[in-house]
Image (cartoon, helix red, strand yellow):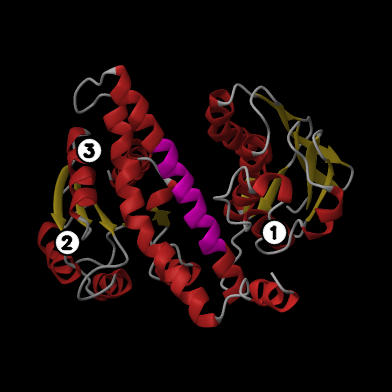
Amino acid sequence: MGVSNMNKKVESKKPTIAQRDYVAIAAHQLRTPLTTLRWFLGPLLAGEFGELNEEQKKFLSAFSRSTERMIDLVDTILNASRIEKGEIKIKPEPTDICVFAEKIYAEILPLCQEKSQILNFTCGKDIPVVSLDQRLLHEVLSNLLHNAVRYTPEGGIIAFLVERNPDALVCTVEDTGFGIPKEEQGKVFERMFRASNVASRYPDGTGLGLYVARFFTELLGGEIKFESEENKGTTFYVTLPITK
Amino acid sequence: MANTILVIEDEMLHRTALQENLAKRGFRTVGTSDGEEGVLLAKKEAPSLIILDMLLPKINGLRVLELLREDSATSAIPVVILTAFDSDEYRLQAEQFGVEWYFVKTDWKLPEIIEKIVGIANKISNATS
């Protein structure tokens, strides 16, 4: 590929307004059939419409996982679209971070169990109730944890920690995964960035998750940083102000 | 009529799932796929709660809310928005019509959303009894 063609390819990653709106509309439209799948696969799997044999359960479980993955992808695309259209409205509410984080932990735990990973959750003492937009924080932490599960091999360890330092809350997500190549670390929060060591292994990522996570963290008045070493793992730190 | 829930939802499978599960929990339910008919049913049935979709044929959920709030017979009926359309702009406008709950369908599994709605309906019932 010549340099000019490469530049064209990079340019094509920036959506025009029409493309952005089209993608957002398409993503919205996908939500109705995805809701149908999500609402009915659960009762089907639970045997509410008749007992299933092991093979049927196995296939339906795979459908269910794919549905959840599609919902995540659609949500991420819509969030990126909202950011670019300046449509995010912040709605702070009193939040017990430990209770809130534990719910996210419970959402992620089954994904870890499927990959025989260990997920440790710790919430420190003296964590105050803070005022923040729960939808934004959920998106940030859920994104980081999904990435940790996805990019950590079977049997790996993931730690999810909430602590208080004197002036702020720090949410940490640490994994023993593939890590991010050093030369690519400056681009991690760019739109559609995908690390070269995982892009071929997992071709279906959007590269929008960390872009959204950084934007939402900043909307929360916080900061997101990370440390990473290839083949050893990555640690993300989300620092949030203590706002009452 | 006490303990009646009106479901205004154009997606037949979603409407049926909501009505069947709420009926199992002891609620009388009435359903329609049409916003205009929903407004008429709200007046006729005087439900204790309305579940309203946002993207509906003919008139959308915001227009339904406006019509409900304009009529003294329906203006005080609590409304839960349950929609696939996750828009902060719509959410804000719905809140201005006094809607306290705006649920995005894909955020919830069916038993979870039923629990939420039952909790809201019971809270309303306790507050008015």
Three-letter code for the amino acid on which mark 1 is drawn: Phe
| In magenta stretch: residue A76 | yes
Element marked by disc 3: helix
Tell me which amino acid carries mark 3: Asn
For disc 1, the marked residue is A193
Camera-nearest label, 2 or 1: 1
Asked if residue A5 lies left or right of residue A229, the reply is left
Q: Residue at position x 29%, y 25% from top?
A: A56
Q: What's the magenta region?
A: A64-79
The CA span between labels 2 and 1 is: 42 Å
In the picture as drawn, the residue positioned furthest to the left comes out as B44
Instruction: Indicate the quadrant where residue A32 lies.
Output: bottom left
Secondary structure under tag 2 reads: loop
Residue A159 position in % (x across, y down): 73, 30
Q: Residue at x 64, y 72 (%)?
A: A9
Q: What chain does mark 1 sit on?
A: A
Label count reads 3
What's the residue at 60%, 21% (across, down)? A116
The amino acid beneath tag 2 is Ser
To which residue does mark 2 refer?
B33
State which quadrant residue A227 falls in. top right
Q: Is residue A137 at all visible to an observer of this figure?
A: yes
Label 1 secondary element: loop
- Residues indicated by labels 2 and 3 sit on the same polypeptide chain: yes
Mark toward the viewer: 1 or 3: 1
Judging from the image, mark 2 belongs to the subunit labelled B
Q: Using the image as rendered, state which of residue B6 and residue A108 is in the foreground.
A: A108
Q: Position of residue B75 (x, y in %)?
A: 27, 67
Q: Nearer the viewer, residue A14 or A243?
A: A14
Q: Which residue is depicted at the point 37% across and 52% down?
A: B105
Which residue is labeled 3 in the image?
B21
Q: Residues within 10 Å of mark 3 (few under 14, many from 20)?
A: some
